[in-house]
Image (cartoon, rainbow, N blue to C red):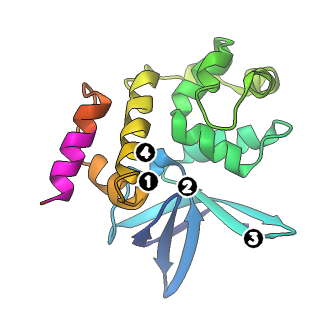
Amino acid sequence: MYEYIIGRIVNIKDGYVVLDNSGIGYRIFTSTNSLMNLEIGEEVTMYIYFNMRDDGVNLYGFRTEEELDIFNMLLLVSRVGPKVGLGVLSALTPNQIKLAILNNDPQVLCKAPGIGSKTADRIILELRDRIDKDDIAQDETPIKHIGDIEAAISGMMSLGYTRGEILKVIGKIDTANMSTEDIMKEALRRLSI
């Protein structure tokens, strides 16, 4: 139904953004990876997955088509719904997911919330033939590092900051060689300015 929505980010909340398009505010659920690349007031294109169920209508959106493609693939797996798909894309990059599937590595997928060993095995089994080996790039973000970022976010949320506030600051920090503690210190320093 929707391919994408172009608009201005008016709010960043825990797990979703509000995108203003022609005076209509769309609540778009998104991954941590997409949230980290958004700023309030920024004009963006969000690639959309429209989900209609008995309990409501939801929009899921991503900054890149690649992330949306992986999300759609994850939804093809039995017992994987939009919330689990978002959890996987919040913990891992699309490239890391592809590598885990091709390398038959369920332990990588189990790092995502809501993914146990049976679900990880099912994802690998059902998606192995859908992954194009030529699409995989050398990924620069180690999986352990994403865990450091998530741990820093959780720690700062326990201090009373919202996920949106934290992601806005962390997105501007080069966290490549930083530990959880270093990420928290730098983010707290920037939040106090």
Q: Amino acid at mark 3?
A: Val
Label 3: which residue?
57
The disc, 4 or 1, on the residue closer to the chain's N-terminal end is 1
Q: Quadrant of residue 44?
A: bottom left
Asked whether disc 4 touches disc 1, contact meaning CB atoms under 8 Å apart, the reply is: no
Location of the N terminus by quadrant is bottom right
Assign the magenta stretch its main secondary structure.
Answer: helix
Mark 4 residue element: helix
The disc, 4 or 2, on the residue closer to the chain's N-terminal end is 2
Per the model, the C-alpha gap separating discs 4 and 3 is 28 Å
Does the magenta segment cover residue 122? no
Q: Residue, x 58% and y 27% (percent of image)?
A: 111
The disc, 4 or 3, on the residue closer to the chain's N-terminal end is 3
Residue 187 placement, left or right of 24: left
Q: Amino acid at mark 1?
A: Leu
Q: Quadrant of residue 174?
A: top left
Mark 1 residue element: helix
Q: Residue, x 63% and y 25% (percent of image)?
A: 109
Asked whether disc 1 touches disc 2, contact meaning CB atoms under 8 Å apart, the reply is: yes
Asked whether disc 1 touches disc 3, contact meaning CB atoms under 8 Å apart, the reply is: no
Q: Residue, x 41% and y 36% (percent of image)?
A: 151
Label 2: which residue?
30
